[in-house]
Amino acid sequence: MDALTVQLPSSAPLTDDQFYDLCRANPDLRIERNANGELVFMSPTGGETGNRNSEINADFVIWNRQAKLGKVFDSSTCFKLPNGADRSPDVAWVKQDRWDALTPEQREKFPPIAPDFVLELMSPSDALEAAQAKMQEYMENGVKLGWLINRRDRQVEIYRLGQAVEILPAPDRLSGEAVLPNFILDLQWFWDS
């Protein structure tokens, strides 16, 4: 099932504060806003996807606690991208100096920053083209490295700023490269569990 997209009238666009307030008033809804100002309502994940996402996020948190290079965020965090979209990747990471450059108010609301790294874990109901378009949007807004993990098709698409997409069939591990120094995501358990 694709996400539900609601177009607002051009005479009544939501300001950033109004969008933030809408999300806060409806905490049980997963809402994003695309660059056109349309609201995108996403369904919650199922158990298998939620479990895998939690396991993956834990690996990032453990690495980051040791590396102390930035901040890790889960899918509940919405980022205000430079193109005006408000997006919530399943996992995001922002380099510490970039995070520190934000004001306390910016950090408290939807941070106006493109993460350095994003990960999207597709649910069985997600449309591949929509997920790929979202990944391209991240890259166009300055994300340096992105992983689109597609369990259904048993593949990972690696997005790098300014480079062609690399597609790996069911990799055992992924490297954080220069963006996430010394980070390795072990995926041996992921494909068959």
Image (tube, rainbow, N blue to C red):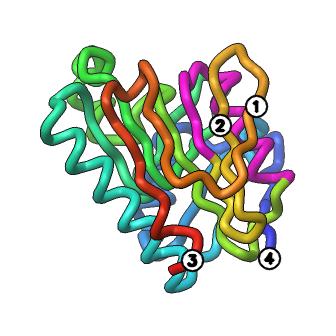
Q: Residue 64: give its label.
A: none
As shown in the figure, which amino acid type bears the numbered disc 4?
Met
Q: Residue 192: give its label.
A: 3
**145 magenta-colored:** yes
Residue at image point 64% right, 32% down: 138
Whether pointer 1 and pointer 2 mark residues with C-beta atoms closer than 8 Å, the reply is yes
How far separated are the C-alphas under marks 4 and 2?
24 Å
Label 2, on which residue?
A: 158
Label 4, on which residue?
A: 1
Q: Is the magenta stretch mostly helix, strand or loop?
A: helix
As shown in the figure, which amino acid type bears the numbered disc 3?
Asp
Which is nearer the N-term, disc 1 or disc 2? 2
How far separated are the C-alphas under marks 4 and 1?
25 Å
How far separated are the C-alphas under marks 1 and 2?
6 Å
Label 1, on which residue?
A: 165
How far separated are the C-alphas under marks 4 and 3?
23 Å
Please name which of the two marks, 4 or 3, marks the residue nearer to the observer.
3
Which is nearer the N-term, disc 2 or disc 3? 2
Q: Which of 43 and 110 is in front in this view?
A: 43
**Vertical arrangement, residue 131 with respect to residue 80, above or below:** below
Residue 153 picture location, percent across and down: 77, 65
Question: Could you tell whether 32 is left or right of 12 in the image?
Answer: left
Query: Which region is colored magenta?
Result: 129-147
Residue 119 picture location, percent across and down: 53, 46
Which residue reaches farthest bottom? 47
The quarter of the rendered structure image containing the N terminus is bottom right
